[in-house]
Image (cartoon, helix red, strand yellow):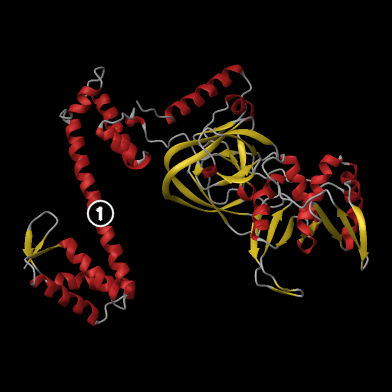
């Protein structure tokens, strides 16, 4: 009855070692060791199995312990045992890495490392300054292989399929700083995610200044992503998966690639709703889309291609706008005006609509169904009742009008004076910059996956879902950096006031960019 150790040697089976390991897990969970039958029963069962075979490996015994513990009533002890086993595996792997590292360093120092001796004919590895450079490069290569580069790139490099240049100068994160493919942002077609596009697609995206600018969709291979939690006022937290070196604009006026807990982002331009007078003076071509939004929120179909709207209470003030757009008074019910139009259908936006038309549609919808909570002008609420498609339409297109949903609550099943709500959600939208998005938490390296970003013309910034402003990807705009300042290695660099200083800063920027990029041949 033998046990096969990890080095291949065999020793006699010892039930007490199993008992000792299980008891350690009990002590971790309970704080002290109680006399229990669980540990002894498991050790006895494994001993019976060991007697029935010639030998068992350490891993097989540990797997049996895990199985028996998970089948017992003490699954909490099982988890403690599994954590301990995993930690021991990590410690052994680290020790093996250290041993291999020391062996490679010894070869380097004693001149026995053939790769270093042949790498550069202009360097003599026997000279102390050169040796110091090689030792530093050795450390950088390890960082590149174990921390910075994706696993598939490292494996391809080691297999000779590709060659990754200058791994000894790689203790930096890659320049591209991007988002998860599922990340949503505001386009001229409404709220979309990167998975809705192909690389190099050209689209129009909303920028923090409230403009729509041309952008090119880009992807940059696999990278580690952090989970950043943002919160605004008393809104619900929002999570964003993004690389740790992404560019953000802070409310302080600074730009950072090292976001930290407590940082506040800049405010974005929010919509200015048209006054009643402005709507009445607006061209029919434009105000019609405001009417369509009002109809969609509070109207109904009438005849084959027509629509009907009842202006209840204070909404009577909008009557003239509908009359200007071809509606006529059909009747008056309990003091409310009923308007109809045989040629204006109740319809949702589509991709053929312009951003201005969609914006007016959303404004009209909010005029019909929106309200300020407790008369506080910083946030507006809208209740959407009816089909799920209507809820999806509002969530998709509201941001085109620069109305950004910061929270939503499901009211389905709620009792009202009119019965039970079938499908209903209330959305909250901030209509002022009184509150800013603030970093609540950052969890580093939660996953590794293909990352995406945008290259946005002029402003080099765009707006994520919920109205979160963010910077452009790795696109370098030298003019913008010199005119408005930039950040190099975490230090704010202000606008230069002389040609000589501008040249110096430009050189520093070029050096940083060049040292952060990598190539494959």
Quadrant where the C terminus sits is top left
> Left or right: 456 with respect to 361?
left
- SS at badge 1: helix
Can you say whether 348 is above or below 510 in the image?
below
The quadrant where residue 88 appears:
bottom left
Return the x and y of residue 383 as percentages of the image width and height: 72, 62
- Left or right placement of residue 156 versus residue 373 in this view: left
At horizontal 54% and vertical 24% (from top left) the residue drawn is 505
> Is 458 located above or below residue 368 in the figure?
above
Dot 1 crowding, Cα within 10 Å, few <14, some 14–19, many 20+: few
Please give left or right for residue 470 compared with residue 99 in the image.
right
In the picture, measured across the screen, residue 470 lies left or right of residue 112, that is: right
Q: Is residue 171 in sight in this rendering?
A: yes
Horizontal and vertical percent for residue 460? 60, 33
Residue drawn 24% across and 18% down? 121
From the image, tell me which residue sits under label 1.
91
């Amino acid at each position: 009855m033998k046990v096969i150790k990890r080095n291949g040697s065999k020793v006699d089976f010892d039930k007490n070692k199993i008992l000792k390991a299980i008891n350690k897990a009990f002590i971790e969970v309970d704080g002290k060791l109680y006399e229990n039958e669980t540990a002894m029963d498991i050790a006895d069962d494994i001993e019976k199995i060991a007697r029935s075979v010639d030998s068992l490996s350490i891993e097989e015994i540990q797997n049996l312990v895990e199985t028996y513990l998970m089948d017992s009533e003490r699954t909490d002890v099982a988890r403690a045992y599994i954590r301990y086993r995993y930690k021991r595996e990590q410690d052994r792997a680290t020790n093996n890495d250290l041993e291999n590292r020391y062996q490679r360093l010894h070869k380097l120092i004693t001149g026995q490392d053939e790769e270093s001796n042949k790498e550069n004919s202009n360097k003599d590895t026997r000279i102390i300054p050169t040796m110091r450079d090689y030792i530093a490069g050795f450390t950088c290569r390890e960082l590149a292989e174990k921390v910075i580069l994706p696993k598939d790139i490292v494996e391809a490099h080691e297999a000779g399929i590709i060659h990754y240049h200058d791994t000894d100068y790689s203790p930096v994160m890659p320049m591209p700083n991007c988002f998860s493919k599922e990340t949503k942002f505001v386009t001229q077609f409404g709220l979309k995610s990167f998975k809705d596009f192909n690389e190099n697609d050209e689209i129009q995206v909303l920028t923090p200044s409230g403009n729509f600018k041309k952008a090119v969709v880009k992807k940059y291979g696999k990278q580690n992503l952090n989970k950043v939690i943002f919160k605004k006022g008393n809104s619900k937290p929002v999570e964003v998966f993004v690389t740790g070196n992404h560019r953000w604009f802070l409310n302080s006026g600074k730009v950072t690639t090292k976001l930290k807990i407590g940082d506040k982002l800049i405010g974005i331009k929010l919509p200015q709703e048209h006054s009643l007078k402005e709507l009445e003076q607006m061209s029919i071509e434009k105000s019609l889309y405001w009417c369509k939004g009002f109809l969609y929120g509070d109207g109904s179909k009438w005849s084959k291609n027509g629509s009907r709207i009842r202006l209840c209470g204070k909404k009577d003030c909008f009557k003239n706008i509908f009359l200007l757009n071809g509606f006529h008074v059909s009747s008056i019910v309990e003091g409310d005006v009923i308007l109809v139009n045989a040629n204006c259908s109740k319809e949702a936006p589509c991709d053929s609509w312009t951003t201005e038309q969609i914006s007016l549609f959303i404004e009209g919808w909010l005029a019909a169904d929106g309200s300020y909570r407790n008369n506080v002008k910083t946030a507006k609420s809208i209740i959407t009742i009816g089909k799920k498609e209507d809820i999806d339409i509002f969530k998709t297109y509201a941001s085109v009008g620069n109305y950004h949903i910061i929270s939503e609550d499901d009211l389905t099943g709620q009792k009202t004076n009119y019965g039970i709500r079938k499908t209903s959600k209330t959305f909250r939208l901030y209509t002022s910059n009184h509150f800013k998005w603030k970093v609540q938490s950052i969890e580093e390296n939660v996953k590794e996956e293909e990352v995406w970003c945008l290259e946005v013309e002029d402003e080099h910034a765009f707006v994520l879902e919920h109205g979160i402003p963010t910077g452009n990807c790795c696109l370098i705009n030298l003019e913008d950096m010199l005119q408005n300042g930039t950040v190099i290695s975490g230090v704010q660099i202000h606008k230069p006031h002389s040609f000589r200083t501008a040249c110096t800063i430009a050189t520093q920027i070029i050096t940083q960019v060049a040292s952060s990029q990598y190539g494959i041949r």
